[in-house]
């Protein structure tokens, strides 16, 4: 049984090892067993031997027996198979992420039985990522312990909030000063006609509570009009989503400053007609907003005059060619990336990078952001790091 994965000892930490149900092993002929189906980057084909030892081992990894039981049964199946062979194979499968411990229990006192049933499909999804000694409940518990601020409950802000509530985030803090208008209903899916005239944060909180009453929802009926208001958005937040775009440019500058001060990762996104984009800034790890703008103004000749013109004229513009599917694509993409950041299942693909979606061709591309040593906003941290390095 040769799997060619890096080996690590998992015997001590898996009481009842089993192949994760999402990675159902399937014999596909020619002595091959496919594990992981069509999952990109995870699926693999294992070689069986002429006695079918690999297939037998995968059958025995059903979460109903200990590793010692499996060793004994494999030896009965094929007396030439040694204990070391079996343990190495189990270790390699575990190191590759295909195994979990069927004896894992949810953390005590975190979820009710009803929540565990509500989140069962989440747990199946999250089980793609964990390896012993983490268990799958840990990821859902991290999400449950997280507080996210959504600034702007409009187009994609409504989708982000809805997705995070359904996924089971612990707390959502909604910030918006606007009321629901009829013209919003083509894309702001949390609201219905009866909500027209209500404050968005109130209507959104009501609807999100109906979707998932386990999520704690707080609201701020305020306009972010300066650094202090941006600091309020970052207070106690594990992550901030900026789904507002006014005042143009300024709102990002304030939020960038506040997020750097409080070391809170934040995401900004938006759509302009046929293009949707998003960027996650992780303070002192990735490019901040000002790093990105410095590079943009140097590299793209029209960027600065365009930004100036928009800053002066956007308030007067009544055009906003956004439809529900575009808001949904952007909001769902951002919610997925937030979940990666909050749970630690993966590094978000948009951390330090701008994802750009060409809606017409439905193509995604990325533009890397680079941290700038001359960035006025990151400079303090750079100088501090240099000073610390000099002292050591
Ligand atoms: Zn910077």
Image (cartoon, helix red, strand yellow):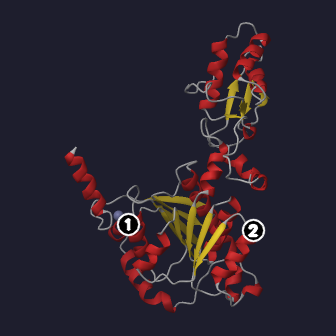
Q: Is residue 172 above or below residue 78?
A: below
Q: Secondary structure at mark 1?
A: helix
Q: For residue 344, which numbered disc appears in the image? A: none
Q: Residues within 10 Å of mark 2 (few under 14, many from 20)?
A: some
- Image quarter of the N terminus: top right
Distance in Å between CA atoms under marks 1 and 2: 34 Å
Residue picked out by circle 2: 211
Query: 322 and 228: which one is in front?
Result: 228
Name which quarter of the figure residue 67 lies in. Answer: top right
- The furthest residue to the front: 109
Q: Residue at the spot x=68%, y=47% of the render?
A: 108
On the question of residue 194 being in view, the answer is yes
**Coordinates of residue 314 in the picture (x, y in percent):** 48, 87
Residue corresponding to mark 1? 261
Q: Quadrant of residue 14?
A: top right
Q: Judging from the image, what secondary structure is the residue with disc 2 in?
A: helix
């Amino acid at each position: 049984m040769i799997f060619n994965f890096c080996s690590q000892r998992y015997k001590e930490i898996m009481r009842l090892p089993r192949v994760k149900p999402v990675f159902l092993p399937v014999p596909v002929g020619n002595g091959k067993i496919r594990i992981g189906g069509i999952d990109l980057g995870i699926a693999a084909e294992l070689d069986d031997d002429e006695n079918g030892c690999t297939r037998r081992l995968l059958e025995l990894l059903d979460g109903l027996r200990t590793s010692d039981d499996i060793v004994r049964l494999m030896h009965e199946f094929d007396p030439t198979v040694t204990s070391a062979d079996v343990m190495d194979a189990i270790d390699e499968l575990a190191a590759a992420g295909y195994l979990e411990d069927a004896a894992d229990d949810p953390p005590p006192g975190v979820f009710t039985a009803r929540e565990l049933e509500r989140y069962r499909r989440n747990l199946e999804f999250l089980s793609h990522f964990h390896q012993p000694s983490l268990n799958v409940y840990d990821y859902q518990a991290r999400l449950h312990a997280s507080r996210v601020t959504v600034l702007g409950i409009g187009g994609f802000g409504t989708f982000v909030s809805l997705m995070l509530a359904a996924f089971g985030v612990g707390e959502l803090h909604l910030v918006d000063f606007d009321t629901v208008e009829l013209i919003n209903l083509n894309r702001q899916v949390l609201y219905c006609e009866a909500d027209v005239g209500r404050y968005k944060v109130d209507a959104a909180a009501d609807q999100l509570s109906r979707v998932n009453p386990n999520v704690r929802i707080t609201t701020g009926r305020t306009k972010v009009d300066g650094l202090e208001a941006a600091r309020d958005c970052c207070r106690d937040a594990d992550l901030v989503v900026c789904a507002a775009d006014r005042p143009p440019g300024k709102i990002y500058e304030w939020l960038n400053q506040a997020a750097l001060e409080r070391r809170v990762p934040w995401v900004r996104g938006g759509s302009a007609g046929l293009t949707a984009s998003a960027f996650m800034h992780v303070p002192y790890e990735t490019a901040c907003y000002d790093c990105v703008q410095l590079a943009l103004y140097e590299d793209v000749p029209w960027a600065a005059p365009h930004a100036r013109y928009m800053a002066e004229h956007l308030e007067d513009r009544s055009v906003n060619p956004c439809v529900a599917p575009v808001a949904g694509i952007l909001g769902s993409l951002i919610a997925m990336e937030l979940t990666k950041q909050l749970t630690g299942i993966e590094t978000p693909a948009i951390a330090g990078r701008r994802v750009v979606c060409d809606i017409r061709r439905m193509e995604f591309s990325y533009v890397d952001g680079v941290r700038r040593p001359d960035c006025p906003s990151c400079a303090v941290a750079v100088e501090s790091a240099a000073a610390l390095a000099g002292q050591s």
